[in-house]
Amino acid sequence: MTERHVPVSGEIELANAQPLRNKLLVLVNATPDDLVIDCADLEFIDAMGISVFIDIWRLLEIQGRRLRIENVHGMPRRALDALELTATLAGQTEPA
């Protein structure tokens, strides 16, 4: 299946999580592609940002598609590690 790469940068938090969710939903609904979110330039993510990733991951799973995040480092990596979501969102396991 074709992958569509989506770079994210800066901060994903309460104030800007919804526009990211909307952008990803457009891609989910407009293409048959799997999504790869490139977090190389992501500096911060809060619970709302993480919920965007999880919601899109679940939606794609229902459709037999995949969401994968890559290049996660620093604070965003620590947040995902603390929630035990890094492997899940990297395409390795299913969430509990």
Image: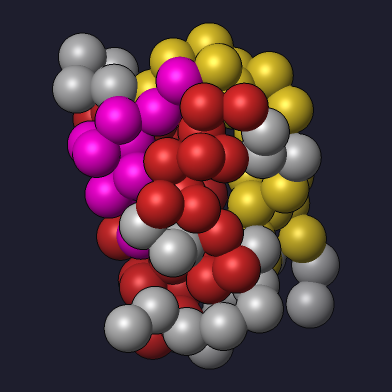
Query: Which residue is painted at 79% across and 77% down in the image?
Result: 1
Q: Position of residue 52 (x, y in %)?
A: 32, 46
Inspect this view and state whether residue 30 appears: no
Front-most of 41 and 96?
A: 96
Q: Between residues 17 and 40, which one lies in front from this camera angle?
A: 40
Q: Is residue 24 left or right of residue 87?
A: left
| Residue 83 lies within the magenta run | no
Spot occupied by residue 58 in the image (x, y as percentages of width and height):
36, 73
Image height check: is 51 above or below 47? Answer: below
Number of on-image labels? 0
Q: In the visual, does 12 lie left or right of 46?
A: right
Identity of the residue drawn at 66% across and 78% down: 92
Magenta stretch, main secondary structure class: helix
- Tell me: residue 11, above or below residue 57: above
Q: Is residue 52 magenta?
A: yes
Residue toward you, 88 or 75: 75
Hey, which quadrant is residue 42 in on the image? top right
Residue drawn at (36%, 57%), measured in percent from left and top? 83
Q: In the image, 41: left or right of 3?
A: left
Q: Which residues are magenta?
A: 44-54
> In the image, residue 24 lies at what x, y percent?
45, 44
Q: Residue at x 42, y 41 (%)?
A: 79
Q: Is residue 75 above or below residue 32?
A: above
Left or right, 18 with reference to 80: left
| Residue 8 appearing in the image | yes
